[in-house]
Image (cartoon, rainbow, N blue to C red):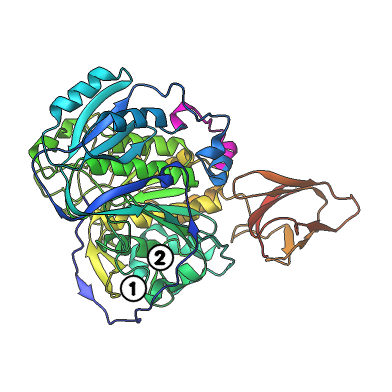
Amino acid sequence: MFAALIIENYTTLFFNEISMKPIANFRVFLLSSFCFLFFGAVAYGQTPNCYRITFSDKNDSPFSISRPEEFLSERAIAKRERFSIPIIEQDLPVNPQYIDLITNFFTVPTQIISISKWNNSVVIFFFENENYQDIIDEMVDNFSFIESVIPVAAYSWSNKIEISIHEQFSQAIVCNSSCDYNYGMSLDNINIHRGHSLHKAGFCGEDMLICVFDAGWNGFNTLSCFQSLYNNGQIWGERDLAPGVNNVYTGHGHGTAVTSEMATEIDGQMVGTAPKANYFFIRSEYPWSEQLVEEDFWAQAAELADSLGADVATASLGYTNFDFPWQNIYTIEDNNGMASIASRAASILTQKGVIVVNSAGNEGNKSWHYIGRPADAFNILAVGAVNKDGEVALFSSYGPTSDERVKPDVASVGWNAWVVAENGYIVQTNGTSMAAPIIAGLSACLWQALPQFSSLELMDLIRKYSDQYNNPNDRTGYGIPNFYQCYLDHYIGVRENKVPEFSVFPNPTTGQLVVSSEYRVVSIEIIDIYGRNLLSHTPLTSQSQTLINISHLTAGVYFLKIYSNRSFEVIKVVKKS
C-alpha cells in the first residue's frame, strides 16, 4: 500500500506539459523474454486464483555462478567484485525446467505472473476464477521439488490481449560540477539534513543509479520539469510488474511525487536530493487493489534492481492488511523481517551491495499502529516522518520490530514535504512516502562522496550520524541524519576547509590530465566508480607536474588517488567523450 498524498497547498503552475521522445529499447535479462497473456477491465472475486509455488532446490539448472553475465549486468558484476560479494546459488534464476513442468501440468489456461530467484518461487495465475485447491494438491503430490503453495491473489480479467514485457534503457553521463542551487520551497526538504551543503561540495548523485519501486508515474514523462532527465539520459528505463498494465506512466501519480523529491532540478523553485543521479522505475504495486501478491512483485523488483547494478533502491510502499480476509496471514508479531517475501528480499538486496530505503508507514494513528512490511527488514533504512523542524508526524508508524530491533531507522521530512504532483503543481503533501525518497537521494550523494564504504557500512554511518543515535526511540529511530557532517568526517579527498596539496587540470577533460604538487608525487592511481584500479603510475622524482593520459577510458566519473611523500588525496575527475 502506498501512502495517500494529502494536498496541503498549491503554488502557481510553473511549466507547460510537453511530450517526451521515446528512448531506445533495451531488454534486461531473463525475465524480460517472457510474453504475458493478460486481460483488461479488472474485477475481483473472493476465490483465489493466483498461487505462490516455492521450489526446494535449483538442481540441474542451466545457469551457473561461473557465468553471471547471463543473469547479472556488467555493472552488477563489477559491484560484486568491488565489495568482494560472492555470486552464489541464491543468485541463479529459478530453474526454467521446473517452471515448464508445472505450467504444462495444468489442462486449464495458466500464466506465470511473477518469479523470485531469491525465494526460489513463482506465482501462477489461473485465468478462470474457480476453486483450484484439488488440482493444486495433485500438483504438489506429483512433483517432489515443490516445497510449498499458498494463495496470494484473486484477479479476474476480460478482453484477452498479448503484450510483451520490456524495458526502456538509455544511458548517458551527466557532466556538471555545479551543484550550488537556490532550492526555493524545497529547502524545507533538504535543510534538516544539511544536504544542500553536500550538494555544494559537488555531490549531487552523478553516476549513481537509483531504482524506484512504486504504483505509477502519471505525467512524469510528459511534464516539462522532467524533460532534462530524459534529454540527459538519466532515466535509464522502466519495468512494469503489475499484470495487464505494461506502462508505468499510467495508473497512479504516487511515483511522480516520490521521484520528484530526488530528481527535480528547477533552480529557485524546487531541487531534489539527487538531481544528477540516474533513475530506473519499477511498478511493483498494483494501483487498483491491495493483495498479498504485491509482496511477490516487491521481491521481483528488488532482484531486478540488483541485476541492473543499482546503488540505491527506494520504495514508499508497505503492507499490513489486504483486500480479502484470507490474505491477512500476518500479524504484528510477524514484523520480524523474515515472515514476508518482500522483507526477506529487502534484506538480501542490502547484502548484494545496494542501499535499501523504505517508508515506515502511515499507521501511527490507526489500529495497526506499527510499521509495515518490508520496513521490518534487516539492515535497510526504514524512514519515519517529521516536519521541517523535526517534530514527529502523528501518522508516522511506530516501531520497534516484533524482535525488538530499532525501527524506524531514521526520519526525514514527510509532514508538509514539497513535491511535484502529477498535474505539474508544486505542492505540499504528508506521508512517510515523502520522507523515504529524501533519505534515498541523499544516500546516493553521500555514497558518491564516500565510495570506499560498502552499502551496509554507509547505512550504518547514516544511523550513527543521526541526532538520536545514543538514545533511539520508536518514532524516529536513531533520528535525523546529518549527511554533510558524515561527509566531512570521512571524505578522503579535498575538503572545503582544507588547502589542497594537489591540483588536477583540465577537469573535465577529454583525455589529458596534469597533476601538479609542490611536494614529490610518489604514485597516482585511476579508480572507477566501482572502486577498480584502472591505472597506476609512478612519476619521475624530478617532476613537479605529471601528465596522465585517460583518453582510452569511456566518458564518466573517475577518481585520482594521488600519493605524495607527505599524504594522499582522492580527487574526482570527469572524462568527457
For residue 114, the mark is: none
- Picture residue at 32% right of the left edge, 63% below the top: 249
Task: Determine the image quadrant of residue 472.
Answer: top left
Amino acid type for the residue under numbered disc 2: Gly
Q: Position of residue 150 (x, y in %)?
A: 20, 30
Pick whichever of labels 2 and 1 is earlier in the sequence.
1
Q: Residues within 10 Å of mark 2 (few under 14, many from 20)?
A: many
Asked whether, in this view, residue 324 is left or right of residue 360, the answer is left
For label 1, the SS is helix
Front-lying residue, 517 or 396: 396
Identify the residue under disc 1.
185
Q: Residues within 10 Å of mark 1 (few under 14, many from 20)?
A: some
Classify mark 2: helix, strand or loop. Answer: loop
Residue 345 in which image quadrant:
top left
Task: Check the image and name the residue furthest to the right.
Answer: 542
Magenta includes 48? Answer: no
- As drawn, the residue found furthest toward the front would be 107
Measuring from the top left, give residue 89's x and y in whole percent: 47, 26
Amino acid type for the residue under numbered disc 1: Met
**Residue visible at 43% across and 34% down?**
93
Residue 59, above or below 276: above
Q: Are marks 2 and 1 in contact (CB under 8 Å)?
A: no
* Magenta extent: 79-91
Q: Is residue 265 above or below residue 548?
A: below
* Disc ID at residue 272: 2
Say which of 274 and 414 sits in front.
274
Q: Is any atom of residue 527 visible in this view? A: yes
* 465 is higher (above) or lower (below) than 171: above
Left or right: residue 450 versus residue 237 is right
What quarter of the picture does the C terminus occupy? bottom right
Q: How many numbered circles are shown?
A: 2
Q: Is residue 513 left or right of residue 484?
A: right
